């Protein structure tokens, strides 16, 4: 049976709480859409104060630090998945023109180095590396934002 339930280090939870609190504070000062635009595209708008962008950079570094703390587990899980799926591992290695597939090839460099702005992954990806759920603790969304479900 495959499970995708995971636990995180206490320090990761503390950083998540710090991130969420600071992001909520930032959301009171500028639209979250502009935060996400800066995080994903690097676009700054003149109507936003420079020190707000500095704060986003600080949060990005806090997020990255926390994500990197969980990456040894992600890497081990991904490596195990590759061992259990040799045909897929061979295909990935061939696509990358390497003799052996790695977790980085499977999941991507930005995911493994904590710089991906992603806040979640597909169910299939969580089966490969359940500890990637750590990204869900560091979403660039504020709790006050409404999630609109398309019907």
Image (spheres, rainbow, N blue to C red):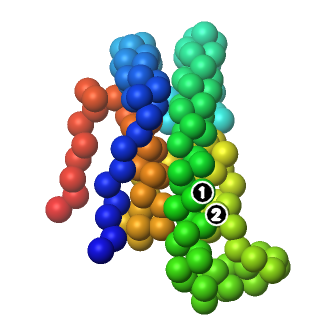
Q: Is residue 105 above or below residue 87?
A: above
Q: Quadrant of the N terminus?
A: bottom left
Image location (x, y in percent) of residue 83: 59, 77
Query: Percent x, y for residue 36?
Result: 50, 36
Q: Nearer the viewer, residue 74 or 49?
A: 74
Q: Secondary structure at mark 2?
A: helix
- Is residue 38 depicted above or below 26 in this figure? below
Foreground: 78 or 143? 78
Q: Looking at the image, which is closer to me, 122 or 112? A: 112
Q: Is residue 62 left or right of residue 29?
A: right
As drawn, the label of residue 112 is: none
Give the residue displayed 52% in from the left and 61% down from the top. 77
x and y percent of residue 105 in the render? 68, 67
Question: Quarter of the image holding residue 75?
Answer: bottom right
Give the numbered dot on residue 75.
Answer: 1
Q: What's the CA distance linking mark 1 and mark 2?
A: 6 Å
Do the residues under discs 1 and 2 have CB atoms within 8 angstroms?
Answer: yes
Q: Which residue is mark 2?
A: 103
Residue located 65% across and 35% down the image: 42
């Amino acid at each position: 049976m495959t499970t995708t339930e995971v636990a995180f280090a206490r320090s990761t939870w503390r950083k998540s709480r710090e991130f969420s609190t600071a992001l909520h504070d930032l959301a009171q000062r500028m639209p979250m859409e502009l935060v996400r635009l800066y995080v994903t595209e690097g676009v700054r708008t003149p109507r936003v104060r420079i020190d707000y962008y500095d704060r986003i950079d600080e949060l990005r570094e806090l997020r990255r630090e926390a994500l990197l703390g969980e990456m040894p587990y992600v890497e081990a899980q991904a490596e195990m998945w590759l061992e259990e799926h040799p045909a897929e591992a061979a295909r990935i290695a061939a696509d990358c023109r390497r003799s052996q597939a790695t977790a980085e090839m499977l999941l991507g460099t930005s995911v493994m180095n904590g710089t991906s702005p992603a806040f979640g992954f597909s169910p299939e990806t969580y089966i490969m590396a359940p500890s990637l759920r750590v990204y869900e603790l560091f979403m660039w969304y504020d709790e006050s934002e409404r999630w609109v479900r398309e019907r």
